[in-house]
Image (cartoon, rainbow, N blue to C red):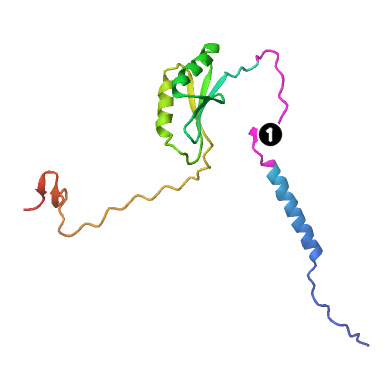
Amino acid sequence: MLRLRRTPLEPRIELVPLIDVMMFLLTFFVYAQVLTTRVAIVPMELKRFSSGTEAKVPPACSVSIDLDGRVWVDRREAGLEQLATMVDERRKADGRTVVYLAVADGKGTVDRAPILQDVWERLKGSGLTVNIVGKPAPARTIQPAAAPATPAAATPNATPNATPAGPGPQGNQGQP
């Protein structure tokens, strides 16, 4: 009987199936990311109802304070003295007007906090709804609750309910 001598085959790693699997995973994750889009921003066609009425958005009046401390009402510069008059004109035009108060973000040339307080005081008596607006804050992560603090180890000579030693508001309490 003749024996055939064969050279042993060395194991090989095939890259084509590996590339196929990686492409499949990439496609899956991209598709999954598309499907996780928030519903609030997905465009959709809404059903029409014959019994409904169209929503009426109340008119808005914007009051802005820029980095230089200047006050603007609906993109027109206004002094603090004219602010109440200009907003009152908008209120007379439509009593449902909502005022949006905005302060520019950044380091300004003047302190804008007193100006904001003055604007708020002048708008407070106008009889209109006033909203302060700004950029949304970054998402906060919920931190796990911290473990309750353990009481400090009692000293051997300490007595419960003892008054701390040292001068206090009424002299040398706790000292003999």
Q: In the image, 150: left or right of 3? A: left
Q: Label 1: few (<14), some or many (≥20) within 10 Å?
A: few
Q: Residue 80 at x, y = what percent?
A: 44, 24
Q: Residue at x 47, y 24 (%)?
A: 79
Q: Quadrant of residue 40?
A: top right
- The three-letter code of the residue at mark 1 reads Val
Q: Residue at x 77, y 62 (%)?
A: 18
Reply above or below: 14 against 171: below
Q: In the image, 122: left or right of 36? A: left
Q: Residue at x 45, y 17 (%)?
A: 126
- The answer to if 64 sits in the magenta stretch is no
Q: Residue 30 at x, y = what percent?
A: 72, 48
Q: Main secondary structure of the magenta part?
A: loop
Tell which of 93 and 136 is nearer to you: 93
Tell which of 124 and 163 is nearer to you: 124
Return the residue found at the far right: 1
